[in-house]
Image (spheres, helix red, strand yellow):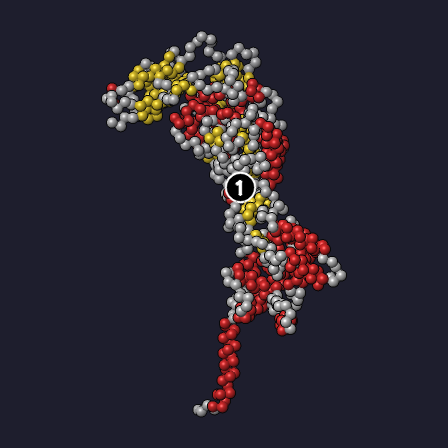
Amino acid sequence: MRINRRILWSALPLGALLVLVLWAALWTAPGPAPDYAQIRQSWQPSQSALLDRHGEIVHVRRTDFSMRRAGWTTLDAISPALQNAIIAAEDKRFYRHKGVDWHGIAGAAWSNARGKPLRGASTITMQVASLIKARSGHKFARHSWRDKVRQARLANAVEHQWNKAQILETYLNLLSFRGEIEGVTAAANVLLGKAPNGLTAEESLALAALLPAPNAGRERLQARLCALVSLQSPASTCDGPLKALETIVARAEIPPQTAALFPQLAPHLAARLLGEDSGNLRTTLDGQIQRFAKDALARQLAQLAHRNVRDGAVLVVENASGNILAWVGSNESTSRSPFVDGVRAQRQAGSTLKPHLYGLAIERRYLTAASLLNDAPINLETAGGLYVPQNYDHGYKGLVSARVALGNSLNIPAVRTLLLTGIEPFRERLFDLGYKGIVRDGDYYGFSLALGSAEVSLAQQVNAYRTFANGGRFSALRLRADAPIAPARQIFGEDTAFIVSSMLSDRSARLLTFGLSNNLNTSFWSAVKTGTSKAMRDNWTIGYSADYTVGVWVGNFEGDSMHGVSGVSGAAPLWHEIISALPQNRTQVSAAPPPMPKGVVQANIQFGDEDTARREVFLRGTEIAHIRAVPPGTRRARLLRPASGAIIALDPDIPFERQRIAIAAQNLGPGMVLELDGQNVDNNSLWFPLPGQHQLILLDENRQKLDQIEFRVRGGNF
């Protein structure tokens, strides 16, 4: 079949035109329109917030310094005045076009053809298309007609898939304002100190005037603002909007800070938990308790300022769950080192470790709460020389019960108790209670471990005391709301924990040192212990009620001494104020003492020739009806050699089989025996030394421990 050449030649221009149109369509294809929900979900503010357990903001921290953005703000949270001002300034036919304003394009072309100043014809939707494209790493070229067509086509696609409210909302969130500010919420917060729903008409016009050239000079901005005011209301003056514009320009020149609209209650936690990609983080904190603890710390440090006290920290924990309700790391206004977190900082423990020591001795049945300990001078031989502990007041109380010794925080009875338990078992118990920094062997710490020579943190202290509040069960603290509650493990027996709590809650047991009226007493049941480290560098008060454990530390991060500040005058008033303000402590059930476990019995005990018997609690089977002191002049049985805590090195120049260590005790009575590492040994004997840690115990006829020493043998590898 023949093809008519005339028809063929006439069809070529039409075909070429179709090919050209198809090529142009493909060449300018913008790609599919993005999903509105994805744009919103991918929005990442430049600051992140710590939220409390109720979802309320407790702290906001800047995490992205490339731009300043707030969280995504919905249209109903933006002032209608601002919406109207921006539509009037940028796209007055926004609600009438479908992405491209042909009337605007024609007007701009006619204006430009007549030589008037260049006018843009980009609609809000077209600007949204450009902003979305820029967020993906690509930009439409301003002077490329191809990119202009692509921009228009993408705007048309957005209009078909989104509604006008979504387009305007996206535009208001993606807009760039003066400096680094992006989005109307950041603009309202930083430039006007307001939330976006509180902007007035004058402030809205001033913000709208920034949009064509956000970083322009004052004169250019003022001219545009007045033109915008005249366009909206010819009879109005621009005095009010100009005043708002001056505020905006002035605040934009201030170095960026976190918006003052948000609370700043937990800076140390925010610095630790909030990163660039963290977003908002929900915690177990209670905003009200956090604010109260922070304010109370500031008040207490202000009262102690004349005594050279600058720093402090507070931690409040819920006993049952381990939820941290308040974490105050320092007081920024008085501290020289405000970035140090006092909750995590390692400080010397002072007397706060004593409850764990007495708990260990009671649990192993070396002592009862009624056992008598001699508060009298004592000299202990160590590898470094004599160790001579002193009480805080440099006085001596004579024979006191373990209850009174703990309640009055007497040092010498605590050291005598450590002689019974041994240094290494006590160190191991502290490690099990969460004091993870106490990792050296017992020889490193020596007898001073009983008096808190080791360094611990406030977080460790609070959780260790919380273990007593929970019947001897230890579990990790919980700070993130999405973290599971940690499983608990039994450290102390429930009966031992009850007896230690009874000793710490006994007001009369504190009488010798603290008197009847002090800040350790509360209107509800509570157990508490104070501590002061060497040279008054650290001051602690840790205590718990039925529902909460509260820990307070005051001192100076630089380590210089406070002036005459003890546990009861420094940290205790703050502890009392905070624990008394916690809600459940005022209920009738929580204010009552904890119930007595089955392994504990209450019995009368008479001390010496007293006429009235006292009530005491005992582990079942350890009850004593009568305690008498050894008559004056009676010499008690005790171990003499080797010296407690001694480190004995074998001599490589002497044959190993010829080396011996003397074992000796004095004033042994009938039935008393010596045990070395669980094996009976004779008094005044020579023992064949074996390298390692050893324990020598003196037992009476009833197998009750009377004295104990520990020593170490080194060497032997020859």
User: Furthest residue to the top?
Assistant: 633
Left or right of 220 on screen, residue 628: left
Instruction: Report x, y in % for residue 365.
Output: 45, 22
User: Furthest residue to the right?
Assistant: 235
In the rendered view, tell whether residue 118 sits above or below residue 570. below
Q: Residue at x 64, y 59 (%)?
A: 220
Instruction: Report x, y in % for residue 677.
Output: 34, 23
Disc 1 designates what residue? 269
Foreground of the two, 344 or 484: 344
Q: Secondary structure at mark 1?
A: helix
Of the 4 image quadrants, the one containing the C terminus is top left
Foreground of the two, 31 or 355: 31
Q: Residues within 10 Å of mark 1 (few under 14, many from 20)?
A: some
Tell me, yes or no, if residue 80 can be seen here: no
Left or right of 166 on screen, residue 631: left
The amino acid at mark 1 is Leu
Q: Residue at x 61, y 60 (%)?
A: 213
Of the 4 image quadrants, the one containing the N terminus is bottom left
Foreground of the two, 670 or 192: 192
